[in-house]
Image: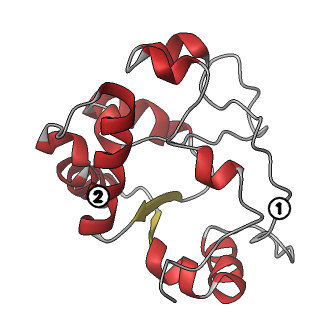
Amino acid sequence: MAEVPRGSGLLVKEMSFQLDAAQFDALAVIATLPLVFVMSDPQLSTTSRLGIVRELSGSTTFRPFESGWQSLCEQLARCRRQGIPYVLVDSDDLRADPAGMTPALVAAIGLPPKPGLETWSPRPGLQLCSPEVGALMSDARRADDPFYRKVLGSPGIQAPPGR
């Protein structure tokens, strides 16, 4: 973080359980815009994570703490206690109305409007996780990252299945 010039921007995509309180505070203190937390239907997020964990390790379960709900609750409480501005987005709302919700999110965090943010060119070959970091979870994750496969192969925010 010390090497990131002030004002150049920093985007951290993380599962809430991956940051302890001190790490969260270190990132939150350098934020120049409200933090954005994204949540989704617990059943859908758990089912998705189970599928990925099964693919990577063959396991049929994961520790409840890794669902991220406990950490999300704690991080939101920290923001409220410390006066850190934040926005909580329900991914179902975003996916149901990307053309309406995307500009609302951009406005909520104080960025200027920019049309078309809800669409992009697919980048299925882009590697967001270094092989070394991926290997901490599974050797299979060195070459392919199922956590990001779907979004990198998509042309934008997509409606949930069945809608």
Q: Which residue is mark 1?
A: 120
Which residue type does callout 1 highlight? Trp
State the residue at coordinates (24%, 67%): 43
Circles 1 and 2: CB atoms closer than 8 Å: no
State the residue at coordinates (30%, 28%): 22
32 or 161: nearer the eye? 161
54 or 111: nearer the eye? 54
- Residue 46's spot in the image, x, y percent? 26, 56
- Residue 30's spot in the image, x, y percent? 56, 37
Label 2 CA crowd tier, 10 Å (few <14, some 14–19, many 20+): few
- Residue 40's spot in the image, x, y percent? 37, 68
Q: Is residue 76 above or below residue 149?
A: below
State the residue at coordinates (59%, 26%): 129
Label 1 CA crowd tier, 10 Å (few <14, some 14–19, many 20+): few
- Residue 121's spot in the image, x, y percent? 86, 57
Q: Residue furthest top?
A: 132
78 or 114: nearer the eye? 114
Q: Which picture quadrant has residue 76?
A: bottom left
**Relative to 157, 146 lies left or right:** left
Which residue type does callout 2 highlight? Thr
Residue 47: give its label: 2
Q: Is residue 48 above or below residue 10?
A: below
State the residue at coordinates (80%, 45%): 123
Residue 163: give its label: none
Tell me which label, 1 or 2, sits earlier in the chain: 2
Circle 1 SS class: loop
Q: Is residue 30 above or below residue 100?
A: above
